[in-house]
Every structure is written in C-alpha cells, then in structure tokens.
Image (cartoon, helix red, strand yellow):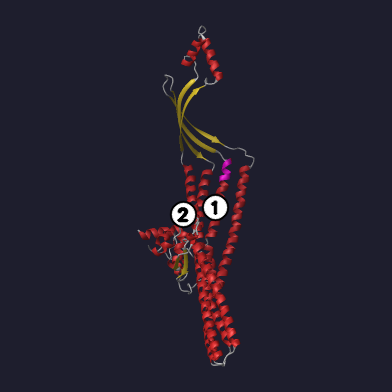
C-alpha cells in the first residue's frame, strides 16, 4: 500500500509519523508482530481471575507501530466512527421522504353479532315472529340451523392498496434532508478530530514513556556513580587519606540515589500502563519504547504562518460552521408546520363476502389533500426564533474557538522555540558536568580534593543529563502540541485518505 505523507512533510518535519497512513485501512497494515498485542474482540469482556490480567507479554514498539495500534483499537475513535455510520443511516431515512409510499391492507373478519345472551333472545323473538305456530323445540332448531332471515353472521374479506405522495411539505422535507447531511458532516469532522486527538495522545504518551525510561537510566547511572564514590571513599579511609565522615557522606548519597531510582522505576511502570490504555491493547500486554530519544523534526513556519494554518485546518472550527448550517435547516423545518401541505393519493379497494352469492366488489379513488395550519398560537415562530438564537450562539462559539486556536498555536510555538534553545544549552551543560566530575574524582583520589566536591559534581552531572533528555522530550512534546494546534497530524480528510489508499492498492 502506498503511504500517504502527512502535513509534517509539507512543513519540513522528519519524524516517524511522517509516512504513517492515518485511516481506517491502517488497521490492516499493522505488522504480524503486533497481532499478539490485540485486545479481545468482545467489548463486554470483564476479567474475573488474577490470571486473566497477569502481564506475560512485554513488547518494545516504535512510535509508528504505536500509531497503528491506536488507530485500530482506540475506543473513542471507534465510537466516533459508529456515530458517523448512524448519521449516514439517518440521512438515508430523511431521503426516503422524496419517494411515494405504497401501503397494502387486508382484513378478514367473521362477525356473529347474535352470539351474546341478549342477541340470542332477539333471535328467538325473530324466530317466533317468522314461525308463530312453532313449538319451543322447533324454534330452537330453527335458530341453531341458522334459518333466520336477516342473520347477523357475516364473513368477509376486504383489501385496499393505497399510494400516497407528499407533493409539497412547506419546505420540511428539504430541511430534514439538509439537517441529516449536516449531521453526517459534523460526525465526519468529529471522526477526524478524534483521530487527531488519538494521534496526539499516542505521541504524547510515547514521549512520556521515553522520558520515564531515560529517567530510570539517569538514576541508574547516578547509583553507579554513587557506588564508585563510596568505593573511592572506603579505599582512601583504609589508606589513611580519608575520613569516616567522607564514607558516611558517600553512603547517604548512594541511599538517596537508590531512592530516586525506585521512584523513577515506579513512574516508568505508570507511563507504560498509560500507553497501554491509550492504545487499548490486550489485558496481558506491557509496552516498551523501541525508538531512540532524538528530536522529532523541525518547524520551518513562522508564527503568523502557523496561526493561519490553524485557522484553515482545525476541524473544530469547521464543525461549528456545520452546526450553524444545521440550525438554519432546523429553523426552516420549524416554519414548515405553518405552511401549506399538499399530498396526492390513489386507493384501490376490494370487498368479498364469503357467505353470499355476490361477486367480488371493487373500486378506486384518487385525489389531493391540502392542509394548512392557519393559526398555531405562535408555536412555530417561537421555535424558529429558538434556532435563530442557536445560530447566534454558534457564531459566538466560533469566535471563541478561533481565539483559542490562536492561543494554542502561540503557546506551542513559544514552547517549541524555548525547548529548542534548551537542548543546545543542556548539551553544553552535560559536557561541562562530565569534565567537572572527572576532575573532581582525580583531585579526590590524589588527596587534594574533598568528597563534597565529588558529590556535588556527581549531582550536577545527573541534573545535566536529566535536563538534556528532558529538553529533547519537551521539544518533541511541544512539536507534537504545535502539530495538533494546527491540525497537522492528519493532512487530508479521512474520506480522501481512504480513497487514495484504495486507488494505490488497485
């Protein structure tokens, strides 16, 4: 399958996400190595034993693989797609009003109105009138034999076929179709918005896990350095060149380093579970990062260009415009109830009474109907004015969202610039801290330095290493945030992506 370049490449970025194809089809391109990470297909499954939630798979994955899993499994995205499918069915329902309706009705009835006690008396009375000389037994035989003239026992079959068509609905039919279309548009934009958010959260959680992994390595290095410092202090004490105080200081520093390592490892486990939750993988799966920590790319757009990109691309703004159009259609639908309604009809009927000798009777009727609610107490106008206010509210929300978009772009842009400068500063600080620690150890081993100098230099190096990696992670997070702020995680509408994907596979 041909991969579709996202807006990152257009903006000069070079991150792993650049060549990722973000569409529902991406779920079919996940590598076979990821199949074991997939969750159960039963959404209602709820584990009931500890064995079912025990972690027995620890899988390193790249950011690209994480994105594949997220787009395939994320439950928010799946729910958004289901809502879109539901809106499409609602549009089909609305369009059905463009066609006439054809109804068939058939009734089969057997009526014996003399079955009650009261009607039995009437039948005997009728029998006496028709046979005045008959005995009671003879009258009963006559009634039971159904020999009375004008008996109420009737069996008949009726049927009708009716064709109706609403010729003019006062604009209601067209308005309902436009409402359904706008709902489809809103839900389509919602799918894209959720996809953007899923990609953002996936990258964010992946970078957080990278940061947690780095902190564990840094704290492990600090523990190793503290161990080395303790060994040096113990050797100097045995040689008579050091003091017990220096050994105790080194032991305290080692204990503190081990405590920080324990905390970092706990944070690492939490970050792993957060990524697992975002990707919605299996209950028994744990994840590790496979990518190296390095800058994800560069941003070559100015602040002003970035703001314009946000205004052009953010689906939140498009969704508000679509909602505004839907409210306009809702207003027209409300007004249609006080406009004339014209419908045409044609009906064909048949009637057959099964207990007589008369042939089947049939007939037809055609005509038109006009209905016009001349006065409804002002209900329709009041409802229409409600949608007028809803339209004004949408316009206010659009202006507010537009301002939020600018603020988000500016904040991410400024953070990106600051973190870019911090990377250079942090790299220089690491070089200086490494050299400072080397010299402090040499001075301490030669007896001309103090244990305090070594501990301080060691702490400075740990801090510098953490600052360097944190600056890179913060830079990537800011870049991810800026790409989200300009809607740059998905270049094309989902339907366009799907169409190009299909064309490339043919």
Q: Is residue 16 left or right of residue 482?
A: left
Dot 1: within a 10 Å radius of its alpha carbon, few (fewer than 14), some, or many (20 or more) residues? some
Q: Quadrant of the N terminus?
A: bottom left
Looking at the rendered structure, which numbered label has been put on residue 42? 2
User: Could you tell me which secondary element the residue under label 2 belongs to?
Assistant: loop
Residue 239 figure quarter: bottom right
Task: Write the residue at 53% across / 57% down.
Answer: 319
Callout 2 crowding tier (Cα within 10 Å): few <14, some 14–19, many ≥20 = few
The residue sitting at 54% across, 38% down in the picture is 341
The vertical placement of 167 against 430, above or below, is: above
Q: Position of residue 308 (x, y in %)?
A: 53, 66
Q: What secondary structure is marked by label 1?
A: helix
Can residue 300 be seen at all in this image of the molecule? Answer: no
User: In this view, which residue lies farthest toward the top?
Assistant: 133
Q: Answer yes or no: is residue 359 visible.
A: yes
Measured from the top left, where is residue 387 in percent x and y? 60, 49
Residue 250 lies, in percent from the top left, at 57, 84
Q: Nearer the viewer, residue 55 or 347?
A: 55
**Magenta span: chief secondary structure:** helix
Foreground of the two, 443 or 201: 443
Closer mark to the observer between disc 2 and disc 1: 2
Task: Say which residue label 1 marks.
Answer: 325
- Disc nearer the start of the sequence (2/1): 2
How many numbered callouts?
A: 2
Is the residue 134 above or below the residue 160 in the image? above
Q: Alpha-carbon distance for marks 2 and 1?
A: 39 Å
Q: Which mark is residue 233?
A: none
Measured along the vertical axis of the image, is residue 131 above or below residue 276? above
In what quadrant of the picture does the C terminus appear? Answer: bottom left
What range of the chain is rendered magenta?
Answer: 333-337
Residue 346 is a magenta residue: no
């Amino acid at each position: 399958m041909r991969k579709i370049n996202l807006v990152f490449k257009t903006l000069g970025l070079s991150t792993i996400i650049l060549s990722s194809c973000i569409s529902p089809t991406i779920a079919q391109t996940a590598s076979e190595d990821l199949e074991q990470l997939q969750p159960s297909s039963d959404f209602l499954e709820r584990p009931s034993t500890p064995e079912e939630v025990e972690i027995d798979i620890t899988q390193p994955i790249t950011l690209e693989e994480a994105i594949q899993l997220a787009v395939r499994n994320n439950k928010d995205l799946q729910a958004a797609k289901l809502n879109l499918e539901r809106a499409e069915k609602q549009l089909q329902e609305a369009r059905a009003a463009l066609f006439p309706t054809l109804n068939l009705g058939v009734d089969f009835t057997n009526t014996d109105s003399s079955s009650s006690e009261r009607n039995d008396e009437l039948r005997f009375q009728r029998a006496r009138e028709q046979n005045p000389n008959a005995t009671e037994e003879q009258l009963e035989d006559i009634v039971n034999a159904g020999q009375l003239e004008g008996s109420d026992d009737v069996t008949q079959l009726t049927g009708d076929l009716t064709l109706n068509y609403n010729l003019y609905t006062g604009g209601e039919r067209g308005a309902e179709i436009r409402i359904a279309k706008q709902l489809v548009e809103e839900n389509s934009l919602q799918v894209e918005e959720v996809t953007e958010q899923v990609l953002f959260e996936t990258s964010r959680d992946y970078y957080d896990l990278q940061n947690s992994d780095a902190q564990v390595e840094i704290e492990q290095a600090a523990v190793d350095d503290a161990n080395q410092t303790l060994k040096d202090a113990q050797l100097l004490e045995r040689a008579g060149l050091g003091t017990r105080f220096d050994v105790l200081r080194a032991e305290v520093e080692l204990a503190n380093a081990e405590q920080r390592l324990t905390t970092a490892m706990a944070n690492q486990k939490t970050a792993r579970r957060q990524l697992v939750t975002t990707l919605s993988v299996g209950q028994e799966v744990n994840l590790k990062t496979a990518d190296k920590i390095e800058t994800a790319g560069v941003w070559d757009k100015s602040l002003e260009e970035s703001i314009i990109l946000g205004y052009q691309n953010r689906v939140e703004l498009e969704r508000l415009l679509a909602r505004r159009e839907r409210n306009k259609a809702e207003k027209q639908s409300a007004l249609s109830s006080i406009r004339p309604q014209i419908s045409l009809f044609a009906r064909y009927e048949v009637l057959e009474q099964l207990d007589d000798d008369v042939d089947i009777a049939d007939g037809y009727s055609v005509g038109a109907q006009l209905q016009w609610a001349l006065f409804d107490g002002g209900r329709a106008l009041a409802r229409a004015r409600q949608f007028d206010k809803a339209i004004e509210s949408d316009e206010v929300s659009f202006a507010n969202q537009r301002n939020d978009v600018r603020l988000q772009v500016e904040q991410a842009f400024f953070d990106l610039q600051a973190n870019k400068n911090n990377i250079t500063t942090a790299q220089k600080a690491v070089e200086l801290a490494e050299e400072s620690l080397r010299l402090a150890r040499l001075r301490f081993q030669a007896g001309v330095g103090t244990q305090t100098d070594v501990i301080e230099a060691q702490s400075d190096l740990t801090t510098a290493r953490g600052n360097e990696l944190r600056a890179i992670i913060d830079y990537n997070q800011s870049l991810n945030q800026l790409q989200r702020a300009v809607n740059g995680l998905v270049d094309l509408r989902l339907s366009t992506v799907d169409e190009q994907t299909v064309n490339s596979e043919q």
